[in-house]
Amino acid sequence: MTMYDRLQEIADRENIIAGVGGAEPFYKLKKRLEGVTVPFTDYSIEERTEPSLTMPDVGSLVAVGLSYNVVYDSIDDGKYRGCISAGAVGRDYHNVVKEKLEIIKNDLLKNHSAMIFSDTGPLVDREVAVRCGLGMAGRNLSIINGKIGGMFFIGYMLTDMVYEKWEAPSVKANTDVCSNCNRCEAACPNNALENGVCNYEKCISYLTQKKGILSYEESRALGRQIYGCDLCQRVCPKNREYKRAYSPYAYPDIEELLNMSNKEFERSYKSTAAGWRGKRTLQRNALIALGNMKADAADILEKFADDSREDIRMAARYSLDRIKER
């Protein structure tokens, strides 16, 4: 049994997908990154495209994918509830993905050095996933896999084990995974997607994580999203095979979120992927959601209309103006 076959056995056992690829620089990616501002990363173009700058003796890359294709049942209890992306419900996926990579490292690479990353690493995880055979990029920029679709978290590992020793099959790229479908582009409420390119400053998921004051247009685009956005994924035909589940965290009680102490917030959100952005940004989004929902919530909003924090104050005033339009 080859190392690659053993990798697939682990992947099946751990309910993930996995693949391997060479560690040569991502030459084509360099040109695409020039002049492009990517949020939440401070790595240089060289660091993002040359694996050897992170690990000088790197011999191969290992990528894994963990599905989050779950639809959470809505909650109709008369409370004002926002929405949180399916990927941010439950235990922080960064930790789960790293644990899967640790299992692979301990099972297959005991005598080799390795470095593990999940979302926050220097390399562009989608490019690593493509090279390792996990799928191809769709119009919504997600990597689409023939087995599990496009809703999966990506993690990767750099190891000094040379690529040839894995005896992995050559990757046959299907560059036309979307054909003429453009449902994701049509579904984006802020027109962030066009011809396979994302304008991150318009992306709803980005806006929910952006700190500070949101403009009127940005606030309207948010809808009732408290964190993240799944719209471009939900309409994708590749993600039709989903699981159903229930979690109150998927539709947070806005009034409860607005009244949380720091300790209560940590207890509720610290272990989730949404918690990293902090209580203040999520509360700003919650205030905006009330206005976009045209909720009868002036009494709630007025408590924050003179808040000392400008972003909170402006969000409350935005929503007070919105509910007057009812």
Image: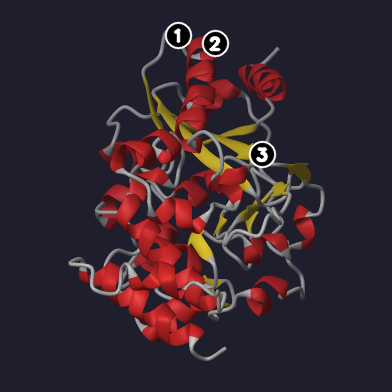
- Closer to us: mark 2 or mark 3? 2
Res. 95 image quadrant:
top left
Measured from the top left, where is residue 219 in percent x and y?
43, 77
Q: How is the image coloured?
A: secondary structure
Residue tagged 3: 170
Give the number of the disc on residue 70: none
- Amino acid type of disc 3? Ser
Q: Is residue 84 visible?
A: yes
- Amino acid type of disc 1? Lys
Q: Nearer the viewer, residue 193 or 314?
A: 314
Q: Is residue 131 visible?
A: no
Name the residue rendered at 29%, 42% in the picture: 262
Give the number of the disc on residue 107: 2
Measured from the top left, where is residue 307 in percent x and y?
23, 68
Q: With respect to residue 295, does 10 lie above or below?
A: above
Measured from the top left, where is residue 61 in percent x and y?
47, 33
Q: Residues under labels 2 and 1: Cα distance? A: 7 Å
Give the number of the disc on residue 110: 1
